[in-house]
Amino acid sequence: MARLQNKVALVTGASSGIGRATAKLFAAEGAKVVVGARRQAELDSLVAEITAAGGQAVALAGDVQHEDYNQALVALAVEHFGRLDIAFNNAGTLGEAGPSTGVSEAGWANTLAVNLTGPFLGAKHQIGQMVKNGGGSVVFTSTFVGHTFAFPGLAAYAASKSGLIGLTQALAAEFGPQGVRVNAVLPGAVETEMYHAANDTAEKRDWVNNAHALRRAGQPEELARAVLYLASDDSSFVTGTAQLVDGGISITRS
């Protein structure tokens, strides 16, 4: 039987990369899916792909920085599919990079708004709905950066993504008694638009890939399978975790 049969799932940052791969996998595993991102055309093509494969999906474009958008995504899930069981808060940004002494206040604030405040606002409304259904699973996309490893020039990114781990633990403790599990997945380098934007030369990509024990970047589908585990009942006794899916970059120094 499909692992998410009769479940309703919400995925943000679904227009590309890890979010898109996860939405497609959720649908293939039987979930009805609500997908969100800023780019309407990419969401429309994703819904078309899922539908063509026999799944069910609806889309709503918007910006996770805004509470009303997060609220609208949950309302769309309930309106179309009657409930919400799973939420993958994946939307994120690398943010303003460079020496920390030169990062602007606006750049810092925007990075935290997208990477930390947005997921909080999402979880606020997602968990409220899940409690009505007797429980559910919330998953955040954090990163190894700022958790087990650090790169110069990524202070805002590291701080915002590290904050998600604290949020994960706080929400897991608060809503575990009501049947809501909350976990974070921590990718290493994954071949997404963000990865290619940050590593725009062969030399940069080689350096990053070789920093991993597996000597390569991951694929979005590999991360999607890890998220599926945390979203499904296979992880029914797992909550409050920061799950590394990082190709061994956290333990490699050679």
Image (cartoon, grey):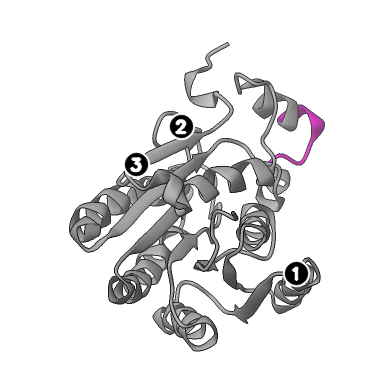
Q: Amino acid at mark 1?
A: Gly
Question: Residue 56: x and y, percent?
Answer: 66, 74
Q: Amino acid at mark 3?
A: Thr
* Mark 1 or mark 3: whose residue is earlier in sequence: 1
Q: In this rendering, is residue 7 above or below 137?
A: below
- Badge 3 density bin: few <14, some 14–19, many ≥20, Cα 10 Å: some
The residue mark sitting in front, 1 or 3, is 1
Closest to the observer, 102 or 191: 191
x 47%, y 52%: residue: 232
Q: How far separated are the C-alphas under marks 3 and 2? A: 20 Å
- Badge 2 density bin: few <14, some 14–19, many ≥20, Cα 10 Å: few
Question: Residue 218: x and y, percent?
Answer: 66, 36
Question: Residue 174: x and y, percent?
Answer: 19, 58
Q: Residue furthest front?
A: 1
Q: Which residue is mark 2?
A: 150
Closest to the observer, 103 or 115: 115
The residue mark sitting in front, 1 or 2, is 1
Q: Which residue is mark 3?
A: 241
Q: How far separated are the C-alphas under marks 1 and 3? A: 33 Å
x 28%, y 71%: residue: 131
Q: Which residue is mark 1?
A: 54
**219 left or right of 150 in image:** right
Q: Quadrant of residue 42?
A: bottom right
Say whether residue 132 is visible. Answer: yes
The residue stretch that appears in magenta: 199-204
Q: Amino acid at mark 2?
A: Ala
Closest to the observer, 40 or 201: 40
x 30%, y 46%: residue: 240
Say whether residue 114 is visible. Answer: no
Q: Secondary structure at mark 1?
A: loop
Q: Secondary structure at mark 3?
A: loop
Q: In this rendering, is residue 125 above or below 30?
A: below
